[in-house]
Image: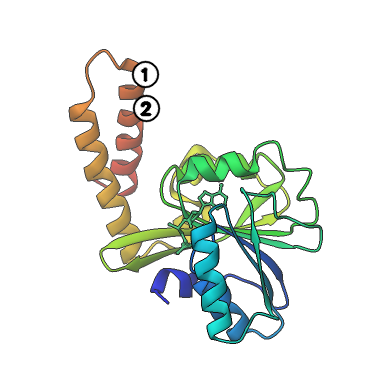
Amino acid sequence: MNNRLKELAELVEENSTILDIGCDHAFLDIYLVNKDKGIKAIASDIAEGPLEQAKKNIERVGLEDKIETRLGNGLEPYTNDIDTLIICGMGGRNMIGIFKGHMRKIKNVQTIILSPNNYQEDVKEFLCKNSFYIDDEVLVKDKKFIYQLIKFKRGKKRYTKRQYFFGPINLIKKGNLFEEYYERELQSKEIVLQLLPKNYRLKRRKVQKEIDLLKKELKK
Ligand SMILES: C[S@@+](CC[C@H](N)C(=O)[O-])C[C@H]1O[C@@H](n2cnc3c(N)ncnc32)[C@H](O)[C@@H]1O
């Protein structure tokens, strides 16, 4: 279990019934069920290989009666008894693709916990415009990478561009990891801007705006 998955497990509420989409090895589900006896987990994956590995890992620790495995794409394995969705270690656009057109189907879901590898702002904006708000956020360092963990709850809140970009809870918590994460974002966006051809006007304008936002927040 790495730091990223351990911190993510902290965001899961007691006695939840979770669907872990893209479980791969199912380490998270095994950890959660061992940690909180009230948690019921369904580990799912689109690919047979990872799901077979998940099954083996679950059997090895004797938790096959506590963790169910289901093969399927995105929300295909969803059933109405599930109240918490978890997706981590996937691209943000893939996550949005999983939810798009299926928000009615997940009407019993009260909590969504995500850790997108990229396009985090788009993911936040999509879910907050589709009946969820941001309840908690954590930045976690694992080896040399810093990951965003975002917990959504069912409900409605309005956010500004700055809040979508940095995360409303991250902006309250701040701290060293916040500085380090957004300092790296600033550096990578400055490189992107240098590499973007001059005729990519719209894209250049978007990146420049993000650089301005970052400089203002980091007081540069
Ligand atoms: C990088 S692994 C992440 C594993 C684990 N969640 C973690 O964070 O350590 C991504 C997993 O997501 C699965 N996956 C990708 N797209 C998916 C989809 N649309 N539905 C279900 N699983 C998917 C892949 O097969 C892979 O096992």
The residue lying at 74 percent from left, 63 percent from top is 83
Looking at the rendering, in which quadrant would you find the C terminus? top left
Disc 2 from disc 1: Cα separation: 6 Å
**Residue 96 vertical position relative to residue 81 in the rendered view, above or below:** above
Looking at the rendering, in which quadrant would you find the N terminus? bottom left
Mark 2: amino acid: Lys
Position in image of residue 94 (x %, y %): 51, 42
Position in image of residue 159 (x %, y %): 58, 43
The residue lying at 70 percent from left, 81 percent from top is 65
- The secondary structure type at the circle numbered 2 is helix
Whether residue 34 is visible? yes
Position in image of residue 206 (x %, y %): 37, 27
The residue lying at 81 percent from left, 58 percent from top is 80
Mark 1: amino acid: Leu
The reply to whether dot 2 and dot 1 touch (C-beta < 8 Å) is yes
Position in image of residue 191 (x %, y %): 19, 36
Q: Which residue is mark 1?
A: 202
**Residue 217 vertical position relative to residue 212 in the rendered view, above or below:** below
Q: Would you say the beta carbon of the disc 1 residue lies within 8 angstroms of ligand 1?
A: no
In this view, the residue in front, 201 or 159, is 201
Residue 116 — which label?
none
Q: Colour scheme of this structure image?
A: rainbow
**Residue 102 vertical position relative to residue 218 in the rendered view, above or below:** above
- Tell me which corner region of the image, top left, top right, bottom left or bottom right, holds residue 165: top left
Residue 206 — which label?
2
